[in-house]
Structure formats: structure tokens, C-alpha cells
Image (cartoon, grey):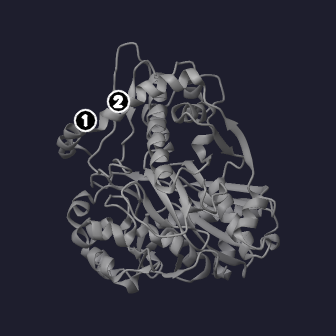
Amino acid sequence: MLAVDCSTTAAKAVVFDATGRALATGRHPIPLTRSAVGIPGAHEQHADDWWSATCVAVRAVVAQVDATRIASVTVTHQRESFVCLDGVEELRPAILWLDSRARREVEELGSTRVHEVSGRPPDTTPSLYKIAWLARHEPAVIERATRIGDVGAYLSLRLTDRWASSWASADSTGLMDMRTLSWSAELCDLAGIRVEQLPVCVRPGDVVGEVTAAAAAATGLRAGTPVVAGGGDGQCAAIGAGAVAPGTLYLNVGTALVCGSVSADYSFDRSYRTVAAAGGSGYLLEAFLSSGTYLVTWFCETFGPFGSTGVALAPEELLEVAAAKIAPGSGGLLALPYWNGAQTPHWDAAARGAVVGWTGGHTRAHLYRALLEGIAFEAKTLVDGVAAAVGAPHTRLVTGGGSRSALWAQVLADVSGSPLVLCAEPETTALGAGMIGATAAGLHPDLAAAAAAMGHLGRTVVPDPAAVAVYADLGEIHATLYSALRPAMTALRAYSP
């Protein structure tokens, strides 16, 4: 099974066998533009870069595994990002989930009714408000667009010539009626578009189409290979972590921080956002913060390069070594990681990052550790909120790029005060997509069987009692920072880039 994960930073391709063993991997970066377009809060990419990076990544795995052995292709991807097309040509760069330009539209159009229908509290993340921004500021784009869709729909179009999206992908637009899992004419009217511009919605796990001759030439895949409807990266990460039924809570420390649990029934509440499960039925109740490993990447890019050290380590590895020598609490330095606004539970687009407690004795390593700890404090809030909403699930699984950091995993356990079970496969999102593809290809009778056969757990991270006590005290202080700084954050909004 080939899983394609088109994330915010790169397109990754991983080939799995029926036991969940990764046989081949490929990766290619995707350029990201931040606010360089002269629009405050803008984060954009070219959709063609999604495709070209996918082609490079897939060609890398096809060079390792015979394409005739690939039984299915399943796509997972960054959510809420969308592109406007005229045919297959993009009319402007795609607008990403990180983009916060639509704060005014959130204030004016967001409501309890929108939350009830879409499953998402008013926030700059869903596509709905940014599409409304385009309708106001670039109306010609909306008028000319024959297609408006998510990353999954775009890659489906390039792979199969079919304009279709899994409802576990399309739901990220914020334009679906989550009770019926179909497009909402009411929400489309609110955004200023027509339902006809959106992709056809299909059930996750259904075959969307087959790899065309043109796509085969671009990727190296065999023409006619089935392409299976997958889901957003959060939903697929949940499946890869084994969260396919109620009773398990997972934390995905990826570009964003996402915590969730499976629910058979639809509900909505400000303590989570409700998304369609990629298993084909049911929902995920998700708590969400847009600053996960994004913040680590930002720190390394902003405060690097680190000069010649004579050691073959990446910047984050060097920082981890230094930060691990610092005691829990970072010398009294506390960070609010709201670099892209605050999501669960505040849903405040005006929120900004803050670091409190500076002295002349603090170093770059202190700041780095404080950022990891700040995200961990937020993770505890997310986990506790979802656990309360679904009745305290008994198993807590941690996945995502951040879980590969031994320091960060320990900090997460120490702040939570509970043991955390790490997933053995580092590319858990891709693994979830592979499980969906394996089920569609008939290698396993259902998704639960695929998860049991292909999912494997890694080590358990046990909290350090001394660190737990320190973080319990600091957590109480950390919990007061947002309300104390909110007036200043709101006032500073007018001056923010």
C-alpha cells in the first residue's frame, strides 16, 4: 500500500506491507510563503508544488519497490488548506490552514449556528472564512474558479482526473453539514461560493478512481492503480495510532498539536471541534492548537544558523542536547505558544505568543525548552478537555514528529502527570492512510483488523515525580497568563504583521 502524506512542509510517500512494515520512503519539501504577499497573517503555497513534491516523493519509493506490487494509493494531507482552480490551473496561490488573514470575517460571520452545522467553533483555521475573505478582496478569483477544494481533492484530480474528496478531507473547509456529511448550501452562501464549485464528496475508503496514464508518467506508478479516498492528516494519524473506536485518546504532536477521541455520534462544543472520522463512519472530537512542531521549525529558522559545530546534528538536535541540561521550568521562563492565535479552548484569533520571566541568566536553550514546555502545558489542557467530554478514555497514545524527541516526550509526560504510550511507526499519519488502503485492497477485512495487524506501539514514557511536582506549580501560573495578557494581545493586534 502506498500512502501519500502531503503536509505543510513536505510531501512524503511511504510503502507499507500488510503487517505495517515500511518498505520504502520518499520525501520532498514544499515551499511556504509567510506574509510576503503583503497580507498580514498570510501563509500560502502553490498547489502545483503539492503535485510536483508528491511526484518526486512517489518516484523515490517506486525506485525501491516495483510499482506493480502497489495495490492501492491513499492520500492524506494538511487540512483546511484550499486552492481555487480554473480547470486544473490555479488562479492564485493556495491559502493554508495557518493563514490568519480572515480575522474580520471570523468576527462578522462566525456564530453558534455556523458552529452547529460545521462542527467548528469560529476560528481563522477553517477555509470558510478565508474563502469569504477572497470573495470580498479578490472577487474575480471566486467568479472565475470552476473548482474550489482541499488538498485531497486537488491530488485526486491530478492522479485520476476526478474532482472528488473524502468527506474526512472536505470537512476541513468548514462548509459541510456534519450531521449529513454533505455540502451545506447555507454555509456556501455565507462564504460567497456555489456548491457546484466544490468537489464530489465520497466515503473514506472508497475507490476514487485509477491512476491515469499522465499521472503514471509523472509519478512512476502503474496506470490503473486504484486511488482510495483517505482523509485529513489528523484523522489518518488517529487511525495510525489505533484510535478506531471509542475508548482511546491520542495526541498528535505534528506541525499542529491535535488531541482527539472517536465518537459514534455527532455533537458540538467549544471544548473541541468535530470532524469526520476517516474510518468511513462516526466522528473525531478534536482539541487543537496550531503551534506544534511549527514553533520548533520557526525557532530554528529564525534564530539559526547555529554556526559550525563540527557535529553532524540538526539545529533542533543541538538545542535538545542543550535544553536537556536545564532543569524543568526553564529557570522560571514561561511561554504561551500562540504564534498563530489560540484555538481550543479560547478560540481567539487575536491571541499572540508571549514569553514571560526573562532574566539576564536565560539563554537560547532556556527559551527553546520553555517553548516545548509551553506546548506541553497546552497539550494537557487539550487532553483534559477531550477526556472530560468523552468520559476519560483510558489509553493515551502519542504520535507525530514531536514524539521522536526524547526530551519533548518526557516533558509531555511530566506535565500531564500520566504515562504516555508512543507509537512505534514515526510516520503515523501515513500509516493510517496505509491502513485505509489495505482495507480497500482487501488485505484486511475491515479497518479494525488493519489497525490491529499494522499498528505497533513503542515505549511508554513514565513521568518523573519530581518534575511532575514542579510542573504542577508552574502549570497554575501558566494557566493565568492568557487572561492576564489578553487585553495587551488585543491592543497589539493592530501592529502585528
Q: Which mark is residue 485?
A: 1
> Looking at the image, is 216 positioned above or below residue 424?
below
How far from the left and from the top, in percent, is residue 127? Answer: 37, 66
Q: Nearer the viewer, residue 56 or 239?
A: 239
Q: Is residue 380 at all visible to an observer of this figure?
A: yes
Residue at 43% x, 18% y: name it. Answer: 331
- In the drawing, does residue 215 fall left or right of residue 331? right
Taking 151 as reference, is 300 above or below it?
above
In the image, is residue 218 above or below residue 9? below
Q: What is the tally of numbered marks visible in this picture? A: 2
157 vs 173, nearest the viewer: 173
Mark 1 or 2: in front is 1
What amino acid type is highlighted by mark number 1?
Leu
Q: Secondary structure at mark 1?
A: helix
Residue 453 location (% of width, % of height):
79, 60
Residue at 62% in and 70% down: 279
Determine whether, in the image, residue 130 is placed left or right of residue 375: left
- What residue is shown at x 22% (from left), y 70% (from top)? 136
Q: Residues within 10 Å of mark 2 (few under 14, many from 20)?
A: some
Residue 322 seen anywhere in this rendered image of the structure: no
Looking at numbered disc 2 in the image, what kind of residue is underneath it?
Answer: Val
State the image coordinates of residue 163 (x, y, percent, origin top left). Answer: 52, 82
Residue 140 sits in quarter? bottom left
- Please give the residue where the numbered disc 2 appears in the rendered image: 355
Q: Position of residue 87 (x, y in %)?
A: 45, 82
Q: Quadrant of the N terminus?
A: bottom right
